[in-house]
Image: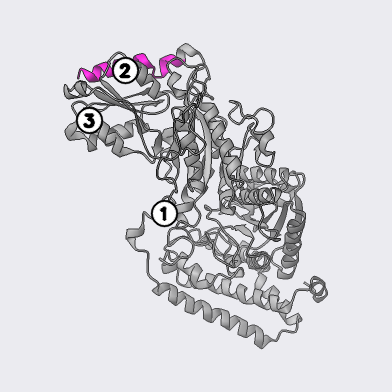
Amino acid sequence: MSKELMEAFKIDTAILKKAYRLMITAKTMADTYEENKTICSKYVHSTSRGHEAIQLAAAFQLKPYDFAALYYRDDSMLLGIGMQPYELMLQLMAKADDPFSGGRTYYGHPSLRREGFPTIPHQSSATGMQAIPATGMAHAISYFESQGLANGEEKPVVLCSLGDGSVTEGEVAEAFQMAVLKNLPIVYLVQDNDWGISATGKEMRAMDAYEYAAGFKGMERLRVNGSEFTESYEGMRVAFEYVREVRKPILVHAKVPLLGHHTSGVRREWYRGNNLQEHGVNDPIPKLRQVLLESDVTTEEIQWLEQEAQKAVAQDYQRALDAPVPDPATFDQHEFAPTPVTEEKGERSPAGAEKTIMVDAALHAVDDILRTYPEALFYGQDVGGELGGVFREAALLAKKYGDARVFNTPIQEAYIVGSTAGMSAVGAKAIVEIQFADYIWPGMNQLVEELSKSCYLSMGKFPVQSLIRVPIGAYGGGGPYHSGSIESTLLTIRGIKVVYPSNAADMKGLMKAAFLDPNPVIMLEHKGLYWSKVAGTEDAKTVEPDENYILPLGKANVVQYADDEEVRLGNSMTVITYGMGVYWAKTAAKQFKGSVEILDLRTLNPLDFEAVVASVRRHGKALVLTEEPLMNSFAESLAGRISKECFQQLDAPVYTLGAANLPAIPLNVELEKMMLPNPEKVAAAMEELLNY
């Protein structure tokens, strides 16, 4: 770059020298890792070699009140915000004092909540998935500003850093769509080195990110040469200034060389050939060195900067080698953040209160939450506007609280789920809805990779407060895409809680507890119980608790006891169930008066296994009842645990009953009846078990 152009950009020499020192620091770190690869490649890592200029240019724009979602190659950016090589090396070697994860996650995967630094929430491997949580952060900032809840005069910006290959991800399109739809304050920085792993840009895409972003009306765009620090600095300065003032999104496309390996596990010599030499022409370091010389920085001062950086890296590397490893006994810490809700509070059956149906209890709970907590908002498909949800479960809330708090989203289950991680990091508390359980699958990537792992991998710094409402279950002719049960799939995901109320009072109390829980909670709400219109479900309609009622998660409830005399005679059994199973069991139990106890689990994770064991030991015979197809289900797993724990007290095998093992629920109601459990099938199982 010419001296005249550099002067036009008016970059202070001190900034240029700082950038050069940090570039040498990043290069020396990469060289050190390569020279000591038997140690440093024990765990796979990537470095920023070739990307240093654009990363430092971006880092120098970030303020302590900003937020960032970084790319796994962004170690220069971490150095640029003030992280020390020693800290990054602790993560490289999975040491105990790794400031991001305590040795739990990969190099270059930060999660930082530290005074004086931008907030960097946990994220997964950052191949596009980070775009949705990052956009959720910007969404939360915009929400707070719209409600007059923003702190101080600062105008926070979110930086979302992406590799070029990741922009082909569908989830990136969802993020871009919401950013322009809602005018969100976010900078998308795309570092384009024209490589995936071994795939080149021409193999992976029909256009680059700058061209792609043109399809998102309202997305400002900017191209920079990411190997030139001065041009990168000016480009990022303009981008941040635009977003900070205009409060709209911008995409910066930076062309950069890749001078290192894709990762330490995929070595450059295996596939790069002459391409490495071609990329070497654009090495940012000699380019910035020349700029310094043209700025009248002496060769001696430049050499001093290099020597200082190299000495610091060598010292930090030795310190990191000597640092302690994690205590193995801490391996299970931070699965969940502690919940403040540990006991039942409020009035469950207030005098004079009328009975209400489950769908209204849910509506009233959300209404109470929105009224009480200004940081709460509610969104999903069709929950806003006039309709208020396809089941009217959000009726009139948008009119009452405004479109900024209760609003419709596009058909974007990934965004609906994943944005809550970003919301939570900023301090907003999102209630979201997936319209039907059968539609949750596009959101599973975000649920598993971003929400469920965040608390554990960030050592408790970033639990994700997220309440996800999911109407579930069959209700007579709903067909294959509106009737499914998904709890067993959800229960294989560690780090989330799963709640399944069976009546209006539980719905209201559990909804409040789920909202106050600092962890991701999925609320499964059976459509067949919403209105108590299905025969035998009249008891789902209960007296409505008061607005202070809260019911802790993880507490099962005996909804029907067996008679003491039948228990004494050995003529009793327990049914362990939840949701619609409670009502199938109640109806079937009428044929065996006094002989059937029914335990409603209410929460599937955390599971009240103590209550399960107590019930089984009381009777010696147990039926685990579910609406799901039975094979490999949660019900079968629970039956296995019961068999092991209660073997000495069992008088019969643990019975299980569920739907037929078919891939979908058929539309025709007679076919549906054949597939699903019902009171008659449950009664037959009860009779067989009682007579065993």
Chain-order first, disc 3 or disc 1: 1
Measure how far apart labels 3 and 1 are at the Cα level: 35 Å
Measure how far apart labels 3 and 2 are at the Cα level: 17 Å
Residue ID for mark 3: 618
> Is 684 colored magenta in this rendering?
yes
Q: Residue 110 at what x, y percent from top left? A: 53, 60
| Amino acid tagged 1 | His
Residue ID for mark 1: 334
Query: Which is closer to the viewer, label 3 or label 1?
Result: 3
Coloring scheme of the render? one colour
Chain-order first, disc 3 or disc 2: 2
| Amino acid tagged 3 | Arg
Chain-order first, disc 2 or disc 1: 1
Local secondary structure at mark 2: helix
Q: Magenta residues, as a range?
A: 672-692
Dot 3 and dot 1 residues touching (CB under 8 Å): no
Residue ID for mark 2: 589
Which residue is the extreme one toward the top? 670
